[in-house]
Image: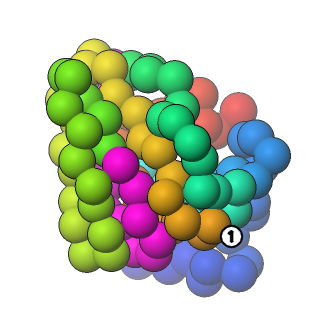
């Protein structure tokens, strides 16, 4: 059995105001993403990846954008992204925490 303590998990700062902590098995990855640079006046640029993604809004509020549709999400809401589909978010509050799960694991996050 593997366990991870949040404050003992290494932090990766991937942009000013954005950091992530992650854990993974051979085929599944969980990522706690904290944003502290909101609110934003517009969404981040669209991006896509070959990984399937499921995300849970743990704190804050966002607009989730995928396939031309925008949806406001609050704590407790989730979004699902199929492989290769462009998507993005817009931060609506000063702090947002997302819990992301990816399969297969994001090798690019391990570098």
Task: Tell which of 27 and 92 is nearer to you.
Answer: 92
Q: Where residue 38 appears, x then y in whole percent?
A: 63, 57
Residue 92 is left or right of residue 110, and the answer is left
Residue 103 in sight: no
Image vertical order of residue 90 relative to residue 95, above or below: above
Q: Can residue 55 be found in the magenta stretch?
A: yes
Task: Tell which of 49 and 106 is nearer to you.
Answer: 49
Residue at 60% of width from left, 69% of height from top?
95
Element marked by disc 1: loop
Q: Range of the magenta residues?
A: 50-63
Q: Where residue 106 appears, x then y in whole percent?
A: 48, 34
- Tell me the quarter of the image containing the C terminus: top right
Q: Residues within 10 Å of mark 1 (few under 14, many from 20)?
A: few
Residue at 41% of width from left, 65% of height from top?
61
User: What secondary structure is the stretch in magenta mostly built from?
Assistant: strand
User: Which residue lies under the disc numbered 1?
Assistant: 9
- Tell me the quarter of the image containing the N terminus: bottom left
Image vertical order of residue 102 relative to residue 5, above or below: above
Q: Residue furthest front?
A: 41
The quadrant holding residue 57 is bottom left
Residue at 28% of width from left, 17% of height from top?
84
Residue 43 is left or right of residue 48, and the answer is right
Task: Tell which of 69 and 34 is nearer to you.
Answer: 69
Residue at 52% of width from left, 23% of height from top?
45
Q: Where residue 46 appears, x then y in whole percent?
A: 44, 22
Residue 19 is left or right of residue 44, and the answer is right
Image vertical order of residue 31 relative to residue 59, above or below: above
Residue 60 in sight: yes
Residue 59 is left or right of residue 82, and the answer is right
Q: Can residue 18 be found in the magenta stretch?
A: no
Q: Where residue 65 appears, x then y in whole percent?
A: 30, 35
């Amino acid at each position: 059995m593997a366990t991870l303590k949040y404050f003992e998990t290494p932090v990766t700062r991937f942009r000013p105001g954005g950091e992530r902590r992650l854990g993974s098995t051979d085929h599944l990855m969980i990522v706690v993403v904290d944003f502290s640079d909101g609110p934003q006046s517009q969404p981040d640029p669209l991006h896509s990846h070959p990984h399937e993604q499921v995300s849970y809004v743990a704190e804050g509020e966002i607009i989730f954008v995928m396939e031309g549709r925008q949806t406001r999400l609050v704590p407790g809401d989730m979004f699902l992204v199929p492989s290769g589909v462009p998507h993005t978010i817009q931060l609506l509050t000063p702090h947002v925490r997302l819990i992301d799960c990816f399969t297969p694991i994001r090798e690019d996050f391990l570098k």
